[in-house]
Image (spheres, rainbow, N blue to C red):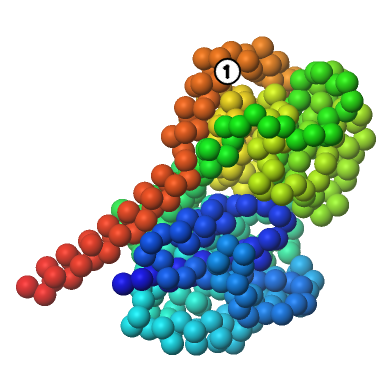
């Protein structure tokens, strides 16, 4: 029987012009031979047509309007009262296809928890990629405490309902384990982020990006620029190493964070904004050393960055800061995970990577590390576990009937 996969996502498909894990999951499910349809369920704060639309990749998007456009009203995504009626059209479509397909609900964030209870799903899966209730910038305020309470309650409902739970880091796995009954512990798995390996094996570089006649070392961050990044660390490093260029590629999601805009005053810091996802490898090839400078915070303890294996797939060494989930990948000349925001330590580690950047054996080692983390292999394993769980339930049910 064909499958319908419903994916609950944080925003509309093209939001931020970035591709996250959930986008790759949707694309993977869409191309499976037993998939009838992939439906991307997402909120939007903007005033625009809601309901169904078909994206260029064939995914069906279902948009749910927020209570009001202001950011503070996004709490409504987690409270049944404010979205229940807005799911009626979606549910009507699903019920109209009942008996013709198998239905899988994938939560990639803890929004719309009631959806798991409004339809007889064959399987509910929670793909947990963030410490959702924690403030992304690390600052705690009364408003964030209220948000934490609302989000935590919604996530707990999803955890209780989920048949399987995938976590992108060991830290998230540990946190989820604390929230489940002991009989569900065997259905929680760590599945780290991966890479579309083949996309990063070319040599093409983006044109007219670096300053004219610049021939020094380029340290690059590519991705969403958010408050979780340590801009003060990079500003201090940029002041110490005037001969290096610090390149930032990605949309500004800092909410006018003054630390980011102060960083841009440094003459050897270049921010070029958002680029199409398909062009990211061309910008990756401008970089000599990949950097992932995160602040020390509970949120970042759980993060497993998407860019780690992309840097390595491109043959680039990488340096991460305050990313404990990546410490297991420490290897000289390949990747360094630092547990300090001391700019001297950061600069020293980058200098070591600078010396080892072009060693052919280390370039091969970086690529080998990334090749083992190809997205298709990760999603294949996830689907195998979902199918295996179904087989386990069938055997258990048959055994209980004897």
x then y, percent, for residue 306? 59, 43
What residue sits 56% from the left and 14% below the top?
Answer: 360
Looking at the image, residue 211 sits to the left or right of residue 51; the answer is: right
Q: Element at badge 1?
A: loop
The quadrant of the picture occupied by the C terminus is bottom left
Check disc 1 and report the residue beneath it: 333
x then y, percent, for residue 24? 54, 53
x then y, percent, for residue 208? 84, 34
What residue sits 51% from the left and 21% below the top?
Answer: 364
What residue sits 55% from the left and 57% below the top?
Answer: 22
The front one of 268 and 139 is 268
- Is residue 401 at least partly visible in the picture? yes
Quarter residue 74 falls in: bottom right
Query: How dense is the environment of label 1, judged by Cα within 10 Å: few (below 14), some, or many (20 and up)?
Result: many
The front one of 33 and 287 is 33
Quarter residue 217 falls in: top right
* Residue 395 higher or lower than 373, as above or below: below
The quadrant of the picture occupied by the N terminus is bottom left
x then y, percent, for residue 60? 56, 71
Quarter residue 309 falls in: top right
- Is residue 41 at least partly visible in the picture? no
What residue sits 60% from the left and 72% below the top?
Answer: 54
């Amino acid at each position: 029987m064909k499958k319908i996969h419903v994916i609950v996502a944080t925003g509309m498909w093209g939001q931020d012009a970035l591709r996250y894990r959930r986008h790759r999951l949707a694309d993977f499910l869409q191309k499976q031979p037993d998939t009838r349809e992939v439906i991307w369920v997402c909120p939007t704060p903007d005033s625009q047509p809601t309901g169904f639309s078909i994206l260029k990749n064939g995914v069906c998007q279902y948009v749910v309007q927020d209570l009001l456009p202001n950011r503070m009203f996004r709490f409504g995504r987690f409270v049944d009262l404010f979205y229940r009626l807005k799911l009626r059209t979606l549910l009507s479509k699903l019920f109209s296809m009942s008996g013709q397909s198998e239905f899988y609900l994938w939560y990639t964030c803890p929004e719309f928890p009631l959806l798991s209870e409004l339809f007889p799903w064959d399987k509910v899966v929670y793909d947990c990629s963030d410490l959702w209730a924690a403030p992304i910038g690390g600052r705690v305020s009364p408003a964030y405490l209220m948000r934490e309470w609302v989000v935590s309650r919604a996530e707990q409902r999803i955890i209780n309902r989920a048949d399987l739970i995938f976590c992108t880091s060991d830290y998230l796995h540990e946190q989820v384990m604390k929230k489940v009954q002991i009989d569900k512990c065997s259905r929680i798995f760590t599945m780290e982020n991966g890479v579309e390996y083949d996309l990063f094996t070319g040599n093409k570089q983006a044109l007219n990006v670096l300053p004219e006649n610049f021939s020094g070392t380029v340290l690059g961050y590519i991705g969403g620029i958010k408050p979780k990044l340590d801009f003060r660390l990079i500003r201090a490093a940029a002041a110490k190493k005037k001969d290096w260029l610090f390149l930032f590629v990605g949309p500004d999601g800092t909410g006018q964070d003054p630390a980011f805009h102060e960083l841009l005053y440094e003459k050897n810091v270049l921010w070029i904004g958002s680029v199409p996802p398909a062009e990211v490898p061309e910008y990756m090839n401008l970089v000599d050393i990949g950097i992932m400078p995160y602040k020390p915070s509970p949120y970042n303890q759980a993060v497993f960055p998407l860019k780690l294996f992309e840097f390595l797939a491109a043959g680039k060494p990488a340096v991460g800061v305050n990313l404990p989930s990546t410490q297991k990948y420490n290897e000289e000349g390949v990747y360094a995970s630092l547990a300090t925001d001391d700019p001297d330590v950061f600069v020293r580690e980058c200098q070591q990577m600078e010396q080892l950047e072009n060693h052919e054996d280390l370039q091969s080692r970086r690529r080998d590390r990334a090749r083992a983390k190809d997205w298709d292999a990760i999603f294949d394993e996830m689907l195998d576990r979902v199918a295996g769980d179904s087989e386990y339930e069938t055997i258990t049910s048959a055994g209980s009937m004897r």
